[in-house]
Structures are given as C-alpha cells and as structure tokens.
Amino acid sequence: MKKRKEKQQEMEKLHVELGQVSTVILSTFKGITVEQDTKLRRAVESAGGRYKVVKNTLAERAGAGTPAEGLLKNLSGTNSIAYTASDPVTLAKVLTKIAKDVPTFQFRAGVVEGRVISIEEIQQLAQLPSKEELISKIMFLLKAPAQRLATVLAAVPRDLAVVTNEAVKENKFAQ
C-alpha cells in the first residue's frame, strides 16, 4: 500500500501533467484483461499520449485548477484517463479503436481545448482526419496552382518543338 507521501507526490505529478495537456478523455476500465490493458497503454503512448488508472479522489485533487477540473469532479466507479498535449484526433482514434475491440472499455466524457465533450463528440472527433493528413491536403492545395502554371508554361516551348520537328520531317522549310 502506498504511503501518504507517495500519494501526494503522485497527485502533484498528475496535476502538473494535466495542466500541460490539451485533451483528457475519461473512461472506465472495469473488466479489461492485463493483455488488453497493455495493448491500450502501448497504443496511447504511440499516439503521443499517456494512460493512467486513477483513484477518484486523487484524480479530483490533481485536476483542481487545470482544464480537466470539471471532468474529474465527483467521480464514481472505476476510472481511467488518457491525455495528450498534442493531437486530440489521434488519441480519440486510438481509444475508439480499442473500444471497438474491447467492449468493456467505455468512454465517459472528455475535455478538448478546455471544453467538456460528450461520448458522441469523442466518436466524431475520432472520425476527423489527423493533423498530418490535414497538413498534407493543405500542401497539395497550395502546390496545385503552381504545378498547373508550370505545366502550361512548359507546354508552349514543347509544342513549338513538336511542330518544328514535324515540319523538318516533312521538309516544309524552304531551302
């Protein structure tokens, strides 16, 4: 059993981490096997996030004064949190995939950019394209007009060369 000092240090560490993140998703973990839990933790870490099983009182105290304060108040039952300071879409996608594979893992609510979101909104968030996909689409859209202009400008000398070549083949130049 943890001593009071260890619990206090754990709470302070969690408070600092929750103060630095933009997304926190609250879920229940009851009925998850050790293998499924390990898979879940690895998936969340690969998405740039952290996953913790938390005691309700510890979570409430650690969440005080952070964007997750409203989410972590008056908790009951078995709870876990996943949080990230980077892309909320990636975290939501990972957790949604796990929730499909493990029916006992269920969402309760979440906080994204300081706003509390519902279970339905978490699932909608998971359907959005990731940050990398959006950046690549924007880059394609920015590059497309320049590429088309280059193609048009290159067509004029190319077409002139083709016409000249055909004229030479047919001996249409006056000598």
Image (cartoon, rainbow, N blue to C red):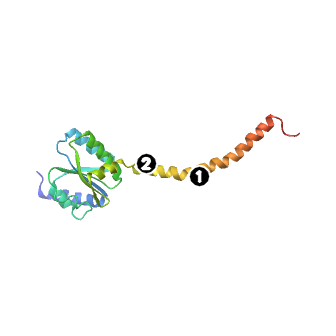
In the rendered view, would you say 159 is above or below 85? above
Residue 120 point in image, percent of width and height: 28, 51
SS under mark 1 = helix
Q: Position of residue 28 (x, y in %)?
A: 20, 48
**Which image quadrant: the C terminus?**
top right
Element carrying mark 2? helix
What numbered label is drawn on residue 56? none
Q: Residues within 10 Å of mark 2 (few under 14, many from 20)?
A: few
Q: Is residue 10 above or below residue 164?
A: below
Q: Residue at x 22, y 44 (%)?
A: 105
Q: Which mark is residue 133?
A: 2
Q: Which residue is mark 1?
A: 146
Residue type highlighted by circle 1: Ala
User: Badge 1: how crowded within 10 Å, few (<14), some, or many (20+)?
Assistant: few
Q: Amino acid at mark 2?
A: Glu
Q: Are marks 2 and 1 in contact (CB under 8 Å)?
A: no
Q: Nearer the viewer, residue 89 or 127?
A: 127
Q: Residue furthest front?
A: 120
Quadrant in the picture for residue 62: bottom left
Residue sitting at the far top: 169
In this view, the residue farthest toward the bottom is: 65
Of the numbered discs 2 and 1, the one sitting upstream in the chain is 2
Q: Which residue does the image show at 62% across and 51% down from the upper left?
A: 149
User: How much space separates mark 2 and mark 1, taking CA atoms?
Assistant: 21 Å
All told, the count of numbered labels is 2
List x then y, in percent, for residue 162: 73, 40
Instruction: State left or right for residue 52 relative to residue 169.
Output: left
Question: As displayed, is residue 155 above or below residue 56?
Answer: above
